[in-house]
């Protein structure tokens, strides 16, 4: 029996950490020494996709039409140690987890081989987590969970995605504050996180959204004019006389 601190068996926790680090070393030993940084990232990405399972059974429907989910408190057993499925330990030791455990385990391995890697949080149809790395000074997203979902189809689509690609694919919202911190930790500068204006996601510097004549526009507003019964926006180059706007 170990020492119980705040309801936790510290002896088992230390054993779990030991087994976890040993598994990390085992995975790293499989990486060929001849690979460059991007090739190492790909090796690890494919290892995770092919060897780790996403536990779909853990999602609990907490809303109508199956749109709102939470996760239960299920644990796995590893050498008589209970491992919460949301933790990174479950991904490497039990080869089964959800996005949080998967992305944090990937981050740990990357950092141990000298590759800076961050974990991002956001929303798809449910709360989601994935990884961010820097490639030639640009942020690239690695979504192992969605690679696992598509391992029989096109899993490489979710490796080194641009910001636009991942948000046009499946991520609806990114935690902007966390994203800024991640970019800073990766030494990526002069890169603006996405913003959502009037229900429309835009990239870069935000220009005010205005609604003119029932139509939402971005940037500087030029009032509509009516020419020949047709409402137009901006300057009518062919207009010879002034017309009243309404």
Image (cartoon, helix red, strand yellow):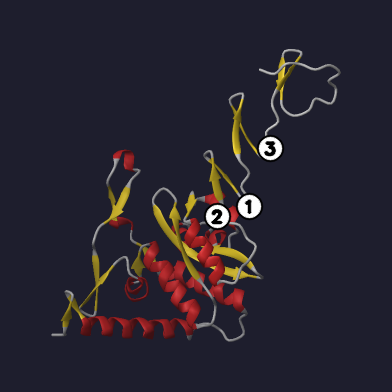
Nearer mark to the viewer, of 3 and 2: 3
Q: Nearer the viewer, mark 2 or mark 1?
A: 1
Q: Which marked residue is nearer to the observer: mark 1 or mark 3? A: 3
Q: CA distance from mark 1 to mark 3?
A: 16 Å
Describe the element under mark 3 as helix, strand or loop. Answer: loop
Mark earlier in primary sequence (3, 2): 2
Q: Are marks 1 and 3 in contact (CB under 8 Å)?
A: no
Q: Relative to 8, does residue 178 appear above or below in the rendering? A: above
Q: Position of residue 105 (x, y in %)?
A: 41, 73
Q: Which residue is mark 1?
A: 204
Separation (CA) of disc 3 from disc 2: 29 Å
Q: Quadrant of the N terminus?
A: bottom left
Q: Is residue 151 visible?
A: no
Please report the residue visible at 83 percent of the width from the left and 20 percent of the height from the top: 239
Residue at point 32%, 86% (across, down): 18
Q: State the SS at label 2.
A: helix
Say if residue 136 shows up in the picture.
yes
- Residue sitting at the far top: 229
The residue wearing badge 2 is: 166
């Amino acid at each position: 029996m170990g020492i119980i601190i705040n309801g936790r068996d510290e002896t088992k926790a230390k054993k779990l950490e030991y087994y976890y680090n040993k598994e990390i070393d085992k995975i790293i030993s499989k990486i060929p020494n001849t690979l460059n940084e991007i090739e190492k990232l790909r090796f690890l990405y494919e290892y995770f996709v092919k060897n780790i399972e996403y536990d779909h059974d853990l999602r609990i429907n907490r809303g109508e039409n199956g749109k709102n989910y939470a996760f239960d408190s299920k644990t796995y057993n590893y050498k008589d140690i209970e491992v919460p499925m949301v933790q990174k330990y479950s991904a490497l030791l039990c080869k089964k987890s959800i996005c949080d455990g998967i992305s944090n385990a990937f981050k740990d391995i990357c950092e141990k081989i000298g590759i800076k890697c961050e974990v991002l949080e956001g929303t798809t149809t449910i709360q989601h987590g994935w990884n961010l790395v820097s490639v030639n000074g640009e942020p690239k997203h690695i979504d192992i969970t969605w690679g696992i979902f598509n391992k029989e189809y096109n899993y490489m689509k979710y490796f080194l995605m641009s910001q636009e690609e991942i948000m046009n694919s499946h991520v609806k919202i990114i935690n902007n504050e966390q994203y800024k911190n991640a970019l800073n930790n990766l030494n990526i500068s002069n890169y603006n996180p996405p913003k959502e204006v009037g229900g429309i996601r835009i990239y870069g510097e935000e220009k005010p959204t205005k609604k003119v004549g029932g139509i939402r526009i971005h940037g500087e507003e030029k009032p509509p004019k009516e020419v020949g019964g047709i409402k137009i926006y901006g300057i009518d180059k062919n207009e010879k006389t002034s017309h009243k706007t309404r």
